[in-house]
Image (tube, rainbow, N blue to C red):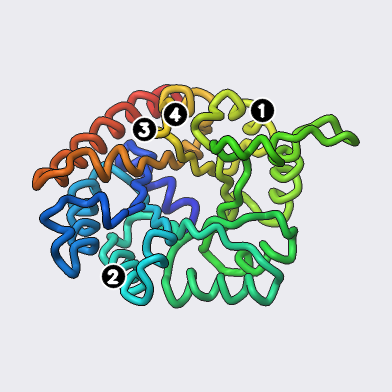
Amino acid sequence: MTRQQLVDQIQSKKSYLCVGLDTDPAKIPVHLQQLPDGVLRFNKAIIDATRDYCVSYKINTAFYESQGLRGWEIMAETLAYIPATHFTIADAKRGDIGNTSAQYAKTFFEVLPFDAITVAPYMGADSVKPFLEYTDKWTIVLGLTSNPGSADFQQKILGDSGKPLYETVLETVSSWGNPGNLMFVVGATKASDLGPIRSIIPDHFLLVPGVGAQGGSLKDVSAYGLNTDAGLLVNASRAILFADSGEGFAEAAAAVARTYREEMQLYLTEV
């Protein structure tokens, strides 16, 4: 998917919501846990319920890889069920030496035709550039994450520059690609840092997890992070997926997604 196609979807739907399909088999409704294809049925129902309110779906691959071969099949079938109008993300956080990254890129851009993949930049340019070689595909690089462990490395001040490490990562990685093929992950619980981040990468899209169950504020994220093209994909996973644990789970998911979209409409009119 091209940048313009993504922007068009955001403008058409008045939404920059990404629904995270972090489907834990132990948390889906009991009546589905008893079925061999319960996870796939759950995912399809969530997609049907939320497709009108979001522009993207993010599949956290760990929840499928942990199920072995059948999990990979469910991931592929889920991906195939997502409408072509929606931006699809493999949240796989890959990153290795160049020839290995090339195989990861082939896996998630060709074998499983996602639009984007999340990537860890710790190993440097040669581990990221194989992903950037694909046309109309996106590499989403970890920038500033919302977990407590981000303080261990990402927020450490570098002695030579006086800047936190994550700022150096943003500055350096942004030169490897462009705003049409690079995004960055910035956690919603770090919303106040979005202002300085926008000064470094004003035009890039940001994938922002952490709204909802993790406590991030959609209002704050939008205030600090929106640009003229919206420039945000705000991800919500548990708040939508597990809004209800009974047979009405899909309706509950739709209601939460609709609420997010309605709030996003207000912020988009202010841009």
Q: Which residue is mark 2?
A: 77
Residue 127, by quadrant, is bottom right
Who comes first in sequence, dot 1 or dot 2?
Answer: 2
Q: Secondary structure at mark 1?
A: helix
Q: Amino acid at mark 1?
A: Pro
Who comes first in sequence, dot 1 or dot 3?
Answer: 1
Q: Is residue 71 above or below residue 253?
A: below
Q: Residues within 10 Å of mark 3 (few under 14, many from 20)?
A: some
Q: Which residue is mark 1?
A: 196
Q: Looking at the picture, how far across and down is residue 186, in whole percent?
A: 56, 39
Who comes first in sequence, dot 4 or dot 1?
Answer: 1
Q: Which residue is mark 4?
A: 216
Q: Secondary structure at mark 3?
A: loop
Q: Is residue 255 above or below residue 63?
A: above
User: The N terminus is located in which quarter?
Assistant: bottom left
Give the label, 4 or 1, closer to the camera.
4
**From the viewer's perspective, is 219 left or right of 152?**
left
Q: Which residue is mark 3?
A: 212
Q: Looking at the picture, how far across and down is residue 85, in whole percent?
A: 32, 57
Q: Looking at the picture, how far across and down is residue 141, in whole percent?
A: 60, 51
The reply to whether dot 4 and dot 1 touch (C-beta < 8 Å) is no
Q: Residues within 10 Å of mark 2 (few under 14, many from 20)?
A: some
Between the C-alphas of marks 2 and 4, the distance is 31 Å
Write the residue at 62% across / 74% down.
102
